[in-house]
Amino acid sequence: MTGTIFDIALPAHEKALRMLERDLIAWITTIDAQGRPHAVPVWFMWHGERVVVFSEPGTQKVRHIRAGSPVLVHLQAGGTFGGDVVILNGHAEISERPASEWLAGFRDDFVEKYEAAIADYGMPLEKITETFSAAIVFTPEAIKAW
């Protein structure tokens, strides 16, 4: 499913959608009350034309989003020389639904994507969604990709 910001006739947009589905790490950037950026790597799922991130409820990114911070999400620059770039500007909110409810909508895909990472993290998936119970839902409004 493609959102209105994507034009799959453009190779960079088609590649961006593939990266959103398969990449393991995205960086989410928020802004604090003093205007300082805060960027952190996160696990994420591309689901229903949105980026869904599970987070501990007390983190800076959650506080910033609750306060109305602008949000930028970008993927790790891939390709041989870092030339696969995807930067998304948009709006994020903290869902009323906990992470465990979101997970029910894409559990198999999440497990397939993060199975090795979950094992390496050493925490069962149910404990992950209990600890990282806040669901950040990011809706992209603009894309830069090459």
Image (tube, rainbow, N blue to C red):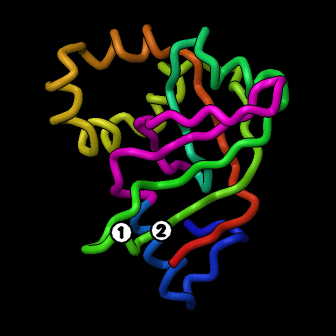
Q: What range of the chain is rendered magenta?
A: 20-47
* Secondary structure state at the residue bearing disc 1: loop
**Residue shown at the point (59%, 49%) measured from the top left:** 73
The kind of residue on which mark 1 rests is Gly
Q: Is 132 positioned to the left or the right of 140 in the image?
A: left
Name above or below for residue 73 compared with residue 85: above
* Magenta-colored stretch includes residue 37: yes
Q: Position of residue 17 (x, y in %)?
A: 48, 68
Q: Position of residue 96 (x, y in %)?
A: 71, 20
* Secondary structure state at the residue bearing disc 2: loop
Name above or below for residue 126 compared with residue 53: above
Q: Local crowd at mark 2 within 10 Å, few (<14), some, or many (≥20)?
A: some
Q: Indicate which disc residue 85 carries.
A: 2
* Magenta-colored stretch includes residue 141: no
Q: Specify the quadrant that holds the N terminus.
A: bottom right
Q: Position of residue 109 (x, y in %)?
A: 33, 44
Q: Give the farthest residue toward the bottom.
A: 9
**Residue shown at the point (52%, 21%) measured from the top left:** 55
Q: Position of residue 52 (x, y in %)?
A: 55, 38
The kind of residue on which mark 2 rests is Val
Q: Indicate which disc residue 100 carries.
A: none
**Residue shown at the point (50%, 26%) measured from the top left:** 54
**Residue shown at the point (36%, 16%) measured from the top left:** 128
Q: Are marks 1 and 2 in contact (CB under 8 Å)?
A: yes
Name above or below for residue 9 compared with residue 61: below
Q: Quadrant of residue 93?
A: top right
Residue toward you, 19 or 75: 75
Dot 1 corresponds to which residue? 82
Name above or below for residue 19 compared with residue 83: above
For discs 1 and 2, the disc positioned in front in the rendered view:
1
User: What separation in Å lies between label 1 and label 2 (alpha carbons)?
Assistant: 7 Å
Q: Is 44 positioned to the left or the right of 124 in the image?
A: right
